[in-house]
Each structure stands twice: as structure tokens, then as C-alpha cells.
């Protein structure tokens, strides 16, 4: 057996351990009885430590070094590059800290669910403080030059820094604030009240799965269930799990499903020969989010999409009133500052992310104490969105991420918004009349283009390198700003902005 073959075998062992943990995490968020949290915390901690120790063992480094001369194909060379980066990051973190973090995350998830349900932030505060303490320790082990945030955010988006996120938000903040102001002054006031009601959950499940299948999610290699906070997970290109949730707003399940299906189709799109290897899956969270936002917003909130599917929606939900396509289109794209990020409109969404970014940076540096988070959060929502959450369940307790120790993650959501339009402009350039395809319910050309250009690349290239290959340039805010402005000027009858 060659060194390269031995390395791949060792990576398969790591993958199996990580997959077992991922399956347990999915189960905890979907079907596990709440009383199982203590045992689940132990299991996840042990599995995480075993995977970490197996991966970071001296033998892995030795095999990696000896494999360099044996890698002949571009895929094998890419595999070694990805493993080298992952190994470099992993070896800096002690196994004991990995286990401690995973144990705490399993317990924290249950405490977060309970705190949110009871609107009881103080009961979660000490656990959240522990999470941020662990994040600070990780950052010190990983190392950074300019800001503690740099070490953490690089884990999710290779090469990302706080300075880079500051520049990204700086480019879009004022144009979005100006657009929100113009929309508020418009006499056009879309009514979305007809989308609120008591909708049969089994019918919602049937309809949302139908939509996911229509756009290309393969249910032979995936499934959809429910969770308190929708997510997409999985452990193989042939086993990808979606979740959604059902609320009084019918769009919550519909657009939540389209969003997670976008993630899921990206995961299903890696080459079969890469399955269960480090090359499979999304290259970064920013690129991943570009795909969920593409299918949720660019496709799912478009007029051509609903020209096709509005009749089916009304047939499935007969309590919906008779309404024309334009009325429905305006309703699902209504701009209104709100409390909940995952249900925010396209224009205000990035403002929600900015709040979380500022919170993370402030807590990590000690400028903000965890116990003062609710007041800080509410003040930022008042400043950026003009609304103040009436309670912490609708405020700082709404997101699951911090309970899972995902700190440094949130800016990739905004990056995904920007990249989605940057990629989409290239797709339209190549495919032509995409609106006509959507009206016909023909998503194969759209999905096929994305599979060829993005999904099948897996982690073979670095994120910025892949985006340059696909669009001809790295992250550029202008396609997003251009398209979002044009779309909402049309919806709200606004005169084109003077540039």
C-alpha cells in the first residue's frame, strides 16, 4: 500500500467518526428526547476527541509528507492541500479542548431551546460565556496578527479577516440604509396578511417537499424533517438532511425549505468519487450560503417562479384568497424591518448580520459582557433597523449558532447574499432567458450550470480562487447592490436612484 493510499484510509476513519457525530447532532435537533441531552453530550465529546486525535496523530503528518511525491492527479494534489490546511488548524487545538467544546455544545443546545421558549436569557448567559471563553482559547491556539476574530472566522471562510468583513459591510451599509429609507417613503404598501394563519403542517410538509424536488433536490439521497432552527446537514453526498419549521407565516416553511434545499443540492453535487473524503462538500460557508440564497431569493422569490407555482399553492391551501401574481409577488418581497433574521427580507437581512458580527467582536475583546448582551442587541436593532425586540426570544436568543460554538460564522451569510447575485449574473449570461425556464418549471439547466461551475468543484479550489474561476473576479458587492436596487425599485414603484 502506498503512502497516499494509507493516508486516504486514515482519512476514511476520521470521516466515519465525524459522520457518526454529525448523525447524532442531526438526531438531537430533530427526534432525540430532551432527556437524552446529557448522554448525547458525552457521546459527542468522546467521538469528537477520537476524530481529532486520529486526524492529528503523528502518523497522519508522516503519511501526508510522504504522499507529496506520490500525488500525480490534480484531485490528489488538491486533496493533500486541503488535508494540510485542515491538519495545520486541527493540530493547534488540544484534543481536551475539542472534547470540552463538543460536550458543552450538546448541553448548550438544550439550554438554548429552553431559554428561548421561556424568554429567559439569564438562564443561558453563563453557558454562553463559557462558549466565548472556549472561542478565545481557540483563537489563541490558532494564532492571529491583527484581531482575535481573524483566527475564528478563517475557520469558516479561508482567508477571511475582521478587516475584510468591515470593508464588505462598509460597501453595502449606506446603500441599504438609503434603499430602506426610499422604500419607507413609497406609497406602495404590500399586504402580506393573507399569508398568516393556521396552516395544516402535513400539507405544508407535502408542498415544501414538492418544491424542493421540483428545483432538483434528490430525495433518493436526502430527506426533510423539522427542527427548532432550520438547517441542512449530512454525512455523505448520498445522505443529505434538510429541516424546516412550520409557523403562522406560510412563507416560513416555503422559503426555509428552498433555502435549505439550496444547501442540500450543493452537498449532493460533489462528485461521487469524492464521497466521504475531505474534497467533498462546500468549499466555504460564504459560497455555501450563496447557493441557499440563490434558491430561496433569486429563484424562490421571483415572479417567474410563482407564475408557475402559485396555482399549486392555492390548490394546496384553499383558504388563501383569490389573488393575482403581482399582489403575491409584492407580498413575499415585502420590506419591513423585523426581529427575526431567518425571516428577514432581502433588503434588511444584512443589517441583522451586522448586529451579530458586532456582538461577536465586542464579546471576544471584552468590550461587551455577556450579561449585557440583551441591551446591546436591542440598541443595535433600534439603530440599524428602527425596531426594538419586545423580548429576548425575539432578540438575542433567536439564533442557534452560539449554542453550537459557531463564533465567526455570521458574516458569511452576508457574503453569500453578495456572491449569489455575482454568480447569477454569469449564469444568466450563459443560459439566456432563465425567466422562461422558471415559468416552465425547468430547473435542470440552472442546476446543471451550478453543478458544473460550483458544486462539482467541492473543496478542490480555495474559495476566492473558485469565485474568480466562475465569475472572473473575487467578491464584488456591485452585482448584489445593482440587482437588489433594481428589483425593489420595481416592486415599490421607485424612480431609479441618482448615482
Image (cartoon, grey):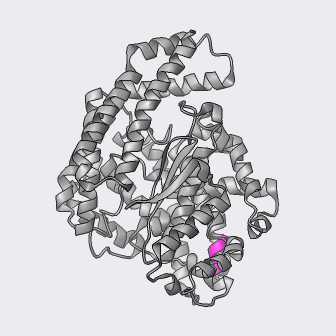
Q: Magenta includes 328?
A: no
Q: In the rendered view, would you say 256 is above or below 56?
A: below
Residue 304, quarter of the rendered image? bottom right
Q: Is residue 5 left or right of residue 51?
A: right
Q: Which residues are magenta?
A: 486-491
x and y, in percent, of residue 398 in the image: 34, 63
Quarter of the picture containing the N terminus is top right
Up the image or down, 119 lies above or below 416; here it is: below
Query: Between residues 162 and 264, which one lies in front from this camera angle?
Result: 264
**Residue 140 seen in the current view:** no
Q: Residue at x 36, y 40 (%)?
A: 147
269 relative to 432 in the view: left or right: left
At horizontal 41% and vertical 72% (from top left) the residue drawn is 385
In this picture, is 239 found above or below 376? above
State the image coordinates of residue 399 (x, y, percent, origin top left). 36, 59
Residue 22 in the image, given as x and y percentages of width and height = 41, 41
Amino acid at each position: 500500500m502506498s503512502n497516499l493510499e494509507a493516508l486516504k484510509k486514515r482519512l476514511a476513519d476520521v470521516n466515519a467518526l465525524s459522520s457518526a457525530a454529525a448523525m447524532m447532532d442531526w438526531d438531537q435537533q430533530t427526534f432525540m428526547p430532551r432527556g437524552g441531552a446529557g448522554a448525547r453530550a458525552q457521546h459527542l465529546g468522546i467521538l469528537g476527541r477520537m476524530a481529532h486525535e486520529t486526524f492529528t496523530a503523528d502518523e497522519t503528518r508522516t503519511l501526508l509528507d510522504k504522499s507529496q511525491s506520490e500525488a500525480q492527479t490534480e484531485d490528489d494534489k488538491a486533496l493533500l492541500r486541503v488535508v494540510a490546511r485542515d491538519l495545520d488548524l486541527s493540530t493547534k487545538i488540544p484534543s481536551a479542548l475539542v472534547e470540552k467544546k463538543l460536550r458543552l455544545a450538546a448541553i448548550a443546545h438544550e439550554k438554548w431551546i429552553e431559554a428561548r421558549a421561556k424568554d429567559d436569557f439569564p438562564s443561558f448567559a453563563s453557558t454562553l460565556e463559557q462558549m466565548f471563553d472556549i472561542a478565545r482559547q481557540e483563537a489563541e491556539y490558532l494564532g492571529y496578527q491583527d484581531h482575535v476574530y481573524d483566527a475564528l472566522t478563517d475557520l469558516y471562510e479561508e482567508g477571511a479577516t475582521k478587516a475584510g468583513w468591515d470593508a464588505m459591510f462598509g460597501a453595502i451599509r449606506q446603500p441599504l440604509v438609503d434603499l430602506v429609507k426610499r422604500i419607507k417613503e413609497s406609497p406602495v404598501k404590500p399586504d402580506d396578511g393573507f399569508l398568516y394563519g393556521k396552516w395544516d403542517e402535513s400539507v405544508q410538509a407535502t408542498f415544501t417537499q414538492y418544491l424542493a424536488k421540483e428545483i432538483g433536490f434528490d430525495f433518493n439521497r436526502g430527506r426533510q424533517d423539522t427542527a427548532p432552527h432550520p438547517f441542512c446537514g449530512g454525512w455523505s453526498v448520498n445522505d443529505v438532511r434538510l429541516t424546516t419549521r412550520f409557523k403562522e407565516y406560510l412563507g416560513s416553511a416555503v422559503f426555509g425549505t428552498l433555502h435549505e434545499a439550496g444547501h442540500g443540492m450543493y452537498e449532493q453535487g460533489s462528485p461521487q468519487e469524492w464521497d466521504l473524503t475531505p474534497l467533498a462538500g462546500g468549499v466555504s460557508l460564504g459560497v455555501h450560503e450563496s447557493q441557499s440564497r440563490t434558491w430561496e431569493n433569486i429563484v424562490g422569490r421571483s415572479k417567474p417562479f410563482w407564475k408557475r407555482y402559485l396555482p399549486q399553492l392555492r390548490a394546496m391551501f384553499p383558504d388563501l384568497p383569490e389573488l393575482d401574481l403581482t399582489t403575491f409577488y409584492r407580498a413575499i418581497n415585502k420590506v419591513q424591518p423585523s426581529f427575526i433574521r431567518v425571516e428577514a427580507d432581502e433588503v434588511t437581512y444584512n443589517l441583522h448580520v451586522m448586529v451579530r458580527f458586532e456582538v461577536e467582536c465586542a464579546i471576544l475583546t471584552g468590550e461587551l459582557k455577556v450579561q449585557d448582551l440583551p441591551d446591546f442587541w436591542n440598541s443595535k436593532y433600534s439603530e440599524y433597523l428602527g425596531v426594538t425586540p419586545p423580548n429576548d426570544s425575539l432578540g438575542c436568543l433567536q439564533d442557534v449558532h452560539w449554542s453550537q460554538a459557531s463564533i465567526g460564522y455570521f458574516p458569511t451569510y452576508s457574503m453569500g447574499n453578495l456572491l449569489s447575485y455575482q454568480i447569477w449574473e454569469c449564469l444568466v449570461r450563459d443560459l439566456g432567458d432563465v425567466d422562461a425556464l422558471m415559468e416552465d418549471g425547468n430547473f435542470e439547466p440552472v442546476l446543471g450550470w451550478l453543478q458544473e461551475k460550483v458544486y462539482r468543484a467541492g473543496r478542490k479550489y480555495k474559495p476566492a480562487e473558485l469565485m474568480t474561476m466562475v465569475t472572473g473576479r473575487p467578491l464584488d458587492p456591485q452585482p448584489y447592490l445593482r440587482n437588489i436596487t433594481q428589483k425593489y425599485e420595481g416592486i415599490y414603484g421607485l424612480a431609479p436612484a441618482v448615482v
